Image (spheres, grey):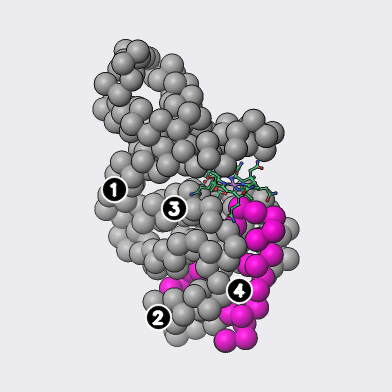
Amino acid sequence: MADDDLDLNSLGDDDLVAQMHDDLYDGLKQEIEEGVRILLGRGWAPYDVLTKALVEGMRIVGVDFRDGILFVPEVLLAANAMKAGMTILRPLLAATGAPRVGRMVIGTVKGDIHDIGKNLVTMMMEGAGFEVVDLGVNTDADRYIAAIREHKPEILGMSALLTTTMPYMKVVIEELKTQGLRADTIVLVGGAPLNEAFADFVGADAYCRDAATAVETAKALVARRQGSALVASA
Ligand code: B1M
């Protein structure tokens, strides 16, 4: 047991999830790992553990960070605890046996080091059968372009969590055009401060509000492109 005072196993599902929100808030990595294992052991789907226990917990952290109740060091601990939980879930989300449907290069844009959402998108895309090349954080246009030339993905995914870094997506898309790569690359963008209007403004193909939407959008746009290619070659 990770906590001497509280046996997480003794809690019902709702209380356990509420406790996990508190533990994430307090950055208690071991407790989060234990909670994730308990929920999985009770037959919870990995996606439900992810969204109901971890993502919702991080949403609460975000509110208090915004309101000046939590500060960077505390939020970093919460992020580490969340990542520990995601590490347990990752192989389970990836092991769906889905046939390979395409490849995506993804990265958080230059100046931005938030990577939890991007990592979540990566996990879900892998689970849906996409091969994902993850460039990490603080990715400049040159690195995106080099990765596209090297890996020839159908999709480029960009993540930004800051209003100050999201405009950089336009820089990358303009560079794709300059280099003659835009027409062959589906560009998907996401991150908490974005919306559809912004995606239109920067010239992306679609805005994805969450990881599940990213998967659905990627599948639909890749299928549409493959359909057009078949028609063109007929
Ligand atoms: Co930062 N931070 N942070 N932070 N941080 C935010 C983003 C903020 C909204 C907090 C707040 O004020 N409420 C605020 C931004 C305000 C703004 O721009 N208007 C903020 C700030 C200000 C900062 C600093 C400037 C703080 C400082 O230093 N004074 C600093 C900036 C550092 C930098 O990047 N240069 C900073 C630092 C940090 C930490 C390092 C402490 C930590 C990051 C740790 C890490 O990622 N490894 C951190 C965190 C954790 C947050 C919050 C609390 C949580 C972000 C998160 O992980 N959410 C965040 C508050 C918030 O977002 N409400 C905040 C959970 C995650 C699952 O959601 O990332 O939205 P999200 O991803 C979703 C969707 O958006 C979508 O799918 C995901 C899954 O469903 N999605 C995509 C995301 N990317 C996608 C890409 C796609 C598709 C979908 O491509 C196809």
Tell me the SS state at disc 1: helix
Q: Secondary structure at mark 2?
A: helix
Q: State the CA–CA distance, disc 3 to disc 1.
A: 13 Å
Residue type at tag 1: Pro
Q: Is mark 4 within 8 Å of ligand 1?
A: no
Residue that label 4 marks: 172
Q: Residue at x 62, y 86 (%)?
A: 178
- How much space separates mark 1 and mark 4, taking CA atoms? 31 Å
Q: Earlier in the sequence, mark 2 or mark 4?
A: 2
Q: Earlier in the sequence, mark 4 or mark 3?
A: 3
Could you tell me which quadrant the C terminus lies in? bottom left
Task: Name the residue carrying label 1.
Answer: 91
Counting residues from the start of the chain, the first of labels 3 and 1 encountered is 1
Q: Amino acid at mark 2?
A: Glu
Residue 28 locus on image (x, y percent): 41, 30
Q: Which residue is mark 3?
A: 119
Q: Amino acid at mark 4?
A: Val
Going by the numbered disc 3, the residue's amino acid type is Asn
Counting residues from the N terminus, which is met first, the one under dot 2 or under dot 1?
1
Q: Which residue is mark 2?
A: 150
Q: Nearer the viewer, residue 49 or 23?
A: 23
Residues at circles 1 and 4 in contact by the CB criterion of under 8 Å: no
**Distance in Å between CA atoms under marks 2 and 3:** 21 Å
Q: Which residue sits furthest front?
A: 73
